[in-house]
Image (cartoon, helix red, strand yellow):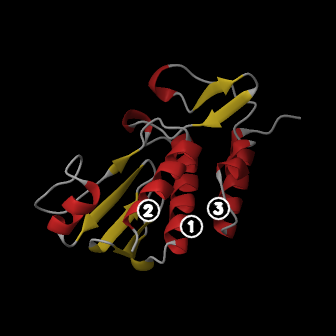
Amino acid sequence: MRKTRREIAREVDEILASGNVRSAEDMRHYHVGHQPKRGHHARRAVTKPGTIETRLPDAAAADTKKAAHVMKAFNAQVESLLGRAGAKLDYESKGEPFDHRRFLLDTKAGTAFVTPYGNWVAIRFNDPEAAIKLVGTFGLNTYSGKWNRHYFAWPINEATSDVARWLEKIVA
């Protein structure tokens, strides 16, 4: 019997609350069985015959309840990567559609604030000049040290892999 969206959402929330999300594979089976939608509301893309990947929502669809579950899963994965990289929780705000947590991360360019926002990750280096040497100037505000990584409509596993790759590059 096919589960309703409400049942799926409840199960996803329970998994996220337990903190046992290790990868996109843990969440993948909750999205198989739904027909992919067209246009900017698409959440999945067929990459190989029989394979469906969960996609992060684009900016236009980010405020929907459906998108919130995928964004929570991405946040949980990024927070797990940050924990493994030695980041410490600095600030937490309660809000809709999910909570935001800011982390302090020691990098090769000094301390950086990192906040996952569901389909993008905000990073602000305290020393912009050192950050220029570390990541270059593409996407980096050379005055404030802000360096955002956007993942609108990326498959969640590719977005998580990209975050992990950048963390490896910048962590001290």
Which-is-in-front pick, marks 1 and 3? 1
Q: In terms of sequence position, does the residue under pointer 1 or pointer 3 come before the other?
A: 3
What is the crowding at mark 1: few (fewer than 14 residues within 10 Å), some, or many (at least 20)? some
What is the crowding at mark 2: few (fewer than 14 residues within 10 Å), some, or many (at least 20)? some
User: Residue placed farthest to the top in the image?
Assistant: 38
The answer to whether residue 97 is visible is no
Percent x, y for residue 156? Answer: 56, 44
Q: Amino acid at mark 1?
A: Ser
Q: Secondary structure at mark 3?
A: helix
Which-is-in-front pick, marks 1 and 2? 2
Q: Return the residue at label 3.
A: 16
For the N terminus, the quadrant is top right
Q: In terms of sequence position, does the residue under pointer 1 or pointer 2 come before the other?
A: 1
Question: Do the CB atoms of the residues marked 1 and 3 lie less than 8 Å apart?
Answer: no
Q: CA distance from mark 2 to mark 3?
A: 22 Å
Nearer-the-camera pick, 38 or 111: 111
